[in-house]
Amino acid sequence: MHASHRLLLNSMPKSGTHLLTQVINLLGYQDFGAHDRLWPRVKDRAGLGTPVVLAHLRVKRNWQRRLVALSGRRRNEQTIPIDVSMPIQVPVKLAQHWLQAIPPGHYLSGHVPWTEATATLLHAAQLKHLMIIRDPRDVLVSFVHFVLRPEHILSKDFRSLSPDQRLILAMEGGRGPHSGYQITGLRQAFASVLAWQREPDVLFLRFESLIGERGDGSSAAQRDAVRAICQHLDLEHNDKLIDHVCLRAFDTDAATFRRGKIGAWQDELTPEQIQLANASFASILQSLA
Protein backbone atom coordinates (compact mmCIF):
# COMPACT_ATOMS: atom_id res chain seq x y z
CA MET A 1 0.00 0.00 0.00
CA HIS A 2 1.46 3.33 -1.06
CA ALA A 3 -0.39 6.61 -0.50
CA SER A 4 0.72 8.75 -3.41
CA HIS A 5 -2.24 10.85 -4.51
CA ARG A 6 -3.23 14.32 -3.29
CA LEU A 7 -6.75 14.35 -1.88
CA LEU A 8 -9.67 16.63 -1.16
CA LEU A 9 -12.01 15.16 1.44
CA ASN A 10 -15.25 17.03 0.96
CA SER A 11 -18.42 16.90 3.05
CA MET A 12 -21.50 18.56 4.36
CA PRO A 13 -20.88 19.80 7.92
CA LYS A 14 -21.72 17.16 10.53
CA SER A 15 -21.88 14.42 7.91
CA GLY A 16 -18.98 12.21 8.92
CA THR A 17 -15.89 14.27 8.12
CA HIS A 18 -13.98 12.74 11.02
CA LEU A 19 -15.09 9.23 10.08
CA LEU A 20 -13.77 9.69 6.54
CA THR A 21 -10.48 11.24 7.67
CA GLN A 22 -9.99 8.39 10.14
CA VAL A 23 -10.37 5.85 7.31
CA ILE A 24 -8.01 7.81 5.06
CA ASN A 25 -5.45 8.05 7.88
CA LEU A 26 -5.61 4.29 8.33
CA LEU A 27 -4.93 3.89 4.61
CA GLY A 28 -1.64 5.74 5.01
CA TYR A 29 -2.49 9.34 4.12
CA GLN A 30 -1.58 12.34 6.27
CA ASP A 31 -3.67 15.37 7.11
CA PHE A 32 -2.09 18.42 5.46
CA GLY A 33 -3.93 20.55 8.02
CA ALA A 34 -2.68 18.68 11.08
CA HIS A 35 -1.10 21.02 13.63
CA ASP A 36 0.79 18.77 16.00
CA ARG A 37 3.77 21.13 16.13
CA LEU A 38 3.98 24.68 17.48
CA TRP A 39 4.73 26.57 14.25
CA PRO A 40 1.82 25.08 12.23
CA ARG A 41 -0.51 25.91 15.13
CA VAL A 42 0.77 29.49 15.25
CA LYS A 43 0.35 29.87 11.48
CA ASP A 44 -3.19 28.53 11.66
CA ARG A 45 -4.17 30.93 14.45
CA ALA A 46 -2.65 33.84 12.54
CA GLY A 47 -4.36 32.94 9.27
CA LEU A 48 -1.07 32.39 7.45
CA GLY A 49 -0.39 29.91 4.67
CA THR A 50 -2.92 27.40 3.37
CA PRO A 51 -6.04 27.06 5.54
CA VAL A 52 -5.92 23.80 7.50
CA VAL A 53 -9.49 23.10 6.42
CA LEU A 54 -11.52 24.65 3.61
CA ALA A 55 -14.33 25.95 5.81
CA HIS A 56 -15.71 29.31 6.86
CA LEU A 57 -13.58 30.30 9.87
CA ARG A 58 -10.17 29.29 8.53
CA VAL A 59 -10.81 30.78 5.08
CA LYS A 60 -12.31 33.97 6.49
CA ARG A 61 -9.25 34.77 8.62
CA ASN A 62 -6.71 33.82 5.95
CA TRP A 63 -4.49 36.84 5.34
CA GLN A 64 -3.85 36.08 1.69
CA ARG A 65 -7.58 36.17 0.99
CA ARG A 66 -8.05 39.29 3.11
CA LEU A 67 -5.25 41.17 1.36
CA VAL A 68 -6.72 40.38 -2.05
CA ALA A 69 -10.12 41.61 -0.88
CA LEU A 70 -8.66 44.79 0.63
CA SER A 71 -6.72 45.59 -2.52
CA GLY A 72 -9.90 45.59 -4.55
CA ARG A 73 -8.64 42.95 -6.96
CA ARG A 74 -11.42 40.65 -5.82
CA ARG A 75 -13.88 42.60 -7.99
CA ASN A 76 -11.84 41.82 -11.11
CA GLU A 77 -11.00 38.17 -10.47
CA GLN A 78 -13.04 35.03 -10.85
CA THR A 79 -13.91 33.57 -7.46
CA ILE A 80 -15.30 30.32 -6.07
CA PRO A 81 -17.31 29.79 -2.87
CA ILE A 82 -15.74 27.95 0.05
CA ASP A 83 -18.02 26.56 2.79
CA VAL A 84 -21.64 25.57 2.28
CA SER A 85 -23.34 27.14 5.33
CA MET A 86 -21.61 30.54 5.27
CA PRO A 87 -19.83 30.69 1.89
CA ILE A 88 -16.82 32.93 1.39
CA GLN A 89 -15.70 33.90 -2.10
CA VAL A 90 -12.05 33.09 -2.78
CA PRO A 91 -10.14 34.11 -5.93
CA VAL A 92 -9.55 31.08 -8.16
CA LYS A 93 -5.82 31.81 -8.36
CA LEU A 94 -5.52 31.83 -4.58
CA ALA A 95 -7.51 28.61 -4.22
CA GLN A 96 -5.28 27.08 -6.87
CA HIS A 97 -2.22 28.11 -4.86
CA TRP A 98 -3.66 26.44 -1.75
CA LEU A 99 -4.40 23.19 -3.56
CA GLN A 100 -0.95 23.08 -5.17
CA ALA A 101 0.57 23.25 -1.68
CA ILE A 102 -0.80 19.79 -0.79
CA PRO A 103 2.05 17.26 -1.11
CA PRO A 104 1.56 13.72 -2.44
CA GLY A 105 0.28 11.38 0.24
CA HIS A 106 -1.65 14.14 2.02
CA TYR A 107 -5.23 15.35 2.12
CA LEU A 108 -7.07 18.59 2.80
CA SER A 109 -10.63 18.44 4.10
CA GLY A 110 -13.39 20.98 3.68
CA HIS A 111 -16.97 21.89 2.83
CA VAL A 112 -16.80 22.94 -0.82
CA PRO A 113 -19.97 23.44 -2.89
CA TRP A 114 -20.06 22.59 -6.58
CA THR A 115 -19.63 25.26 -9.20
CA GLU A 116 -18.37 24.78 -12.72
CA ALA A 117 -15.28 26.86 -11.90
CA THR A 118 -14.55 24.82 -8.78
CA ALA A 119 -14.90 21.54 -10.67
CA THR A 120 -12.52 22.81 -13.35
CA LEU A 121 -10.03 23.92 -10.69
CA LEU A 122 -10.02 20.57 -8.87
CA HIS A 123 -9.69 18.65 -12.10
CA ALA A 124 -6.73 20.81 -13.15
CA ALA A 125 -5.11 20.31 -9.74
CA GLN A 126 -5.31 16.52 -10.30
CA LEU A 127 -6.74 15.89 -6.86
CA LYS A 128 -8.54 12.71 -5.92
CA HIS A 129 -11.90 13.93 -4.65
CA LEU A 130 -14.02 12.08 -2.07
CA MET A 131 -17.38 13.30 -0.82
CA ILE A 132 -19.23 11.95 2.24
CA ILE A 133 -22.93 12.67 2.76
CA ARG A 134 -25.46 11.72 5.43
CA ASP A 135 -29.21 11.64 6.01
CA PRO A 136 -30.13 15.35 6.18
CA ARG A 137 -32.29 14.81 9.27
CA ASP A 138 -29.30 13.46 11.20
CA VAL A 139 -27.22 16.35 9.85
CA LEU A 140 -29.91 18.77 11.05
CA VAL A 141 -29.90 17.44 14.61
CA SER A 142 -26.10 17.29 14.81
CA PHE A 143 -25.69 20.74 13.24
CA VAL A 144 -28.03 22.41 15.75
CA HIS A 145 -26.25 20.76 18.69
CA PHE A 146 -22.93 21.90 17.24
CA VAL A 147 -23.82 25.56 16.70
CA LEU A 148 -25.33 25.81 20.19
CA ARG A 149 -21.86 25.38 21.67
CA PRO A 150 -20.76 28.70 23.22
CA GLU A 151 -17.59 28.84 21.14
CA HIS A 152 -19.43 28.61 17.81
CA ILE A 153 -19.78 31.80 15.77
CA LEU A 154 -23.56 31.23 15.45
CA SER A 155 -24.16 30.19 19.05
CA LYS A 156 -25.86 33.40 20.20
CA ASP A 157 -28.10 33.39 17.13
CA PHE A 158 -29.39 29.90 17.75
CA ARG A 159 -29.59 30.23 21.53
CA SER A 160 -31.89 33.23 21.10
CA LEU A 161 -34.46 31.10 19.24
CA SER A 162 -37.00 28.48 20.25
CA PRO A 163 -36.26 24.82 19.31
CA ASP A 164 -38.61 25.00 16.32
CA GLN A 165 -37.17 28.32 15.16
CA ARG A 166 -33.66 26.83 15.35
CA LEU A 167 -34.65 23.98 13.09
CA ILE A 168 -36.27 26.30 10.57
CA LEU A 169 -33.23 28.60 10.46
CA ALA A 170 -30.92 25.59 10.07
CA MET A 171 -33.02 24.03 7.30
CA GLU A 172 -34.12 27.08 5.35
CA GLY A 173 -31.39 29.60 6.15
CA GLY A 174 -31.74 33.31 6.79
CA ARG A 175 -30.05 36.06 8.72
CA GLY A 176 -28.81 35.38 12.24
CA PRO A 177 -30.97 37.44 14.63
CA HIS A 178 -27.98 38.34 16.82
CA SER A 179 -24.95 38.40 14.51
CA GLY A 180 -26.65 39.42 11.29
CA TYR A 181 -24.67 36.75 9.42
CA GLN A 182 -26.34 35.35 6.32
CA ILE A 183 -26.75 31.59 6.82
CA THR A 184 -27.32 29.19 3.95
CA GLY A 185 -29.93 26.60 4.94
CA LEU A 186 -29.08 22.91 4.95
CA ARG A 187 -31.56 22.26 2.15
CA GLN A 188 -29.69 24.58 -0.21
CA ALA A 189 -26.31 23.46 1.12
CA PHE A 190 -27.16 19.82 0.40
CA ALA A 191 -28.12 20.71 -3.15
CA SER A 192 -24.78 22.45 -3.61
CA VAL A 193 -22.77 19.36 -2.67
CA LEU A 194 -25.04 16.81 -4.34
CA ALA A 195 -24.30 18.70 -7.56
CA TRP A 196 -20.85 17.08 -7.42
CA GLN A 197 -22.57 13.91 -8.62
CA ARG A 198 -22.38 15.30 -12.15
CA GLU A 199 -18.58 14.98 -11.97
CA PRO A 200 -17.50 11.43 -12.90
CA ASP A 201 -14.22 11.54 -10.95
CA VAL A 202 -15.77 12.21 -7.51
CA LEU A 203 -16.30 9.23 -5.19
CA PHE A 204 -19.55 9.65 -3.25
CA LEU A 205 -19.74 7.85 0.09
CA ARG A 206 -22.68 7.48 2.43
CA PHE A 207 -22.06 7.95 6.14
CA GLU A 208 -24.59 5.18 6.75
CA SER A 209 -22.44 2.75 4.74
CA LEU A 210 -19.05 3.76 6.13
CA ILE A 211 -19.99 3.87 9.83
CA GLY A 212 -20.23 0.09 10.32
CA GLU A 213 -21.87 -1.92 13.07
CA ARG A 214 -20.64 0.28 15.94
CA GLY A 215 -22.66 3.13 14.47
CA ASP A 216 -25.69 0.88 13.88
CA GLY A 217 -24.71 0.27 10.28
CA SER A 218 -23.76 -2.82 8.32
CA SER A 219 -20.39 -4.55 8.41
CA ALA A 220 -20.78 -5.66 4.80
CA ALA A 221 -21.65 -2.13 3.64
CA GLN A 222 -18.66 -0.74 5.53
CA ARG A 223 -16.31 -3.21 3.91
CA ASP A 224 -17.69 -2.36 0.48
CA ALA A 225 -17.23 1.36 1.16
CA VAL A 226 -13.61 0.96 2.31
CA ARG A 227 -12.91 -1.23 -0.72
CA ALA A 228 -14.39 1.46 -3.00
CA ILE A 229 -12.10 4.05 -1.40
CA CYS A 230 -9.05 1.84 -1.98
CA GLN A 231 -10.01 1.38 -5.62
CA HIS A 232 -10.59 5.12 -6.07
CA LEU A 233 -7.14 5.85 -4.63
CA ASP A 234 -5.42 3.09 -6.64
CA LEU A 235 -4.36 1.37 -3.41
CA GLU A 236 -3.51 -2.30 -3.31
CA HIS A 237 -5.80 -3.92 -0.78
CA ASN A 238 -6.83 -7.25 0.63
CA ASP A 239 -9.21 -8.58 3.27
CA LYS A 240 -6.63 -8.08 6.03
CA LEU A 241 -6.30 -4.36 5.24
CA ILE A 242 -10.07 -3.92 4.94
CA ASP A 243 -10.55 -5.61 8.34
CA HIS A 244 -7.86 -3.41 9.89
CA VAL A 245 -9.52 -0.20 8.68
CA CYS A 246 -13.07 -1.25 9.59
CA LEU A 247 -12.05 -2.27 13.09
CA ARG A 248 -10.55 1.15 13.83
CA ALA A 249 -12.69 3.52 11.79
CA PHE A 250 -15.20 4.34 14.54
CA ASP A 251 -13.27 6.83 16.69
CA THR A 252 -15.04 8.66 19.53
CA ASP A 253 -12.06 10.83 20.51
CA ALA A 254 -12.68 13.62 17.99
CA ALA A 255 -13.55 17.04 19.43
CA THR A 256 -16.60 17.26 17.20
CA PHE A 257 -17.84 13.70 17.87
CA ARG A 258 -21.27 13.51 19.52
CA ARG A 259 -23.15 10.27 18.84
CA GLY A 260 -22.04 8.94 15.48
CA LYS A 261 -25.14 6.80 15.06
CA ILE A 262 -27.59 6.30 12.22
CA GLY A 263 -31.12 7.61 12.71
CA ALA A 264 -30.53 9.71 15.85
CA TRP A 265 -33.09 12.19 14.50
CA GLN A 266 -35.89 9.75 15.32
CA ASP A 267 -35.08 10.04 19.04
CA GLU A 268 -34.41 13.78 19.17
CA LEU A 269 -37.13 15.35 17.01
CA THR A 270 -40.80 15.58 17.93
CA PRO A 271 -43.38 14.12 15.51
CA GLU A 272 -44.20 17.65 14.34
CA GLN A 273 -40.52 18.46 13.80
CA ILE A 274 -40.03 15.20 11.88
CA GLN A 275 -42.91 16.12 9.61
CA LEU A 276 -41.35 19.56 9.07
CA ALA A 277 -37.93 18.10 8.30
CA ASN A 278 -39.35 15.47 5.94
CA ALA A 279 -41.16 18.18 3.99
CA SER A 280 -38.14 20.49 3.82
CA PHE A 281 -35.74 17.73 2.77
CA ALA A 282 -38.17 15.82 0.51
CA SER A 283 -36.16 16.28 -2.69
CA ILE A 284 -32.86 15.54 -0.91
CA LEU A 285 -34.23 12.35 0.66
CA GLN A 286 -35.55 11.25 -2.70
CA SER A 287 -32.17 11.75 -4.36
CA LEU A 288 -30.44 9.77 -1.58
CA ALA A 289 -32.93 6.89 -1.62
Image (cartoon, rainbow, N blue to C red):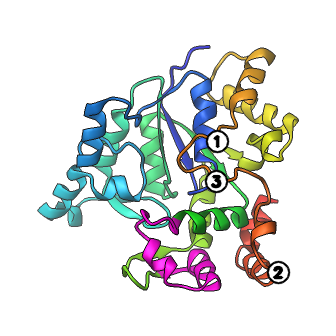
Q: Which residue is mark 3?
A: 258
| Label annotation for residue 252 | 1
Q: Is residue 257 left or right of residue 176?
A: right
Magenta region includes residue 165:
yes
Q: Is residue 220 left or right of residue 249?
A: right
Magenta region includes residue 31:
no
Residue at x 48% of width, y 35% of height? 127
Q: Which residues are magenta?
A: 147-174
Mark before the other along the chain sequence, 2 or 3: 3
Q: Which residue is mark 2?
A: 271
Q: Is residue 222 left or right of residue 120?
A: right
Coordinates of residue 97 in the picture (x, y in percent) = 30, 40
Question: Is the C terminus in the top left, top right, bottom left or bottom right quadrant?
Answer: bottom right
Instruction: Confirm whether residue 35 shows in the render.
Output: yes
Mark 2, other Cα within 10 Å: few <14 / some 14–19 / many ≥20: few
Numbered disc 2: secondary structure: helix
Question: Is the N terminus in the top left, top right, bottom left or bottom right quadrant?
Answer: top right
Q: Could you tell me if the residues under marks 1 and 3 are in contact, i.e. CB atoms within 8 Å?
A: no
The relative height of residue 21 versus residue 119 in the rendered view (above or below) is above
Numbered disc 1: secondary structure: loop
How many angstroms separate mark 2 from mark 3 (CA)? 22 Å
Disc 3 marks a residue whose amino acid type is Arg
Disc 1 marks a residue whose amino acid type is Thr
Between 143 and 90, the residue placed more toward the observer is: 143
Query: Quadrant location of residue 39?
Result: top left
Instruction: Confirm whether residue 201 shows in the render.
Output: no
Disc 2 marks a residue whose amino acid type is Pro
How many angstroms separate mark 1 from mark 2 (CA)? 29 Å
Residue at x 75% of width, y 52% of height? 261
Coordinates of residue 57 in the picture (x, y in percent) = 37, 57
Q: Could you tell me if the residues under marks 2 and 3 are in contact, i.e. CB atoms within 8 Å?
A: no
Residue at x 37% of width, y 34% of height? 35
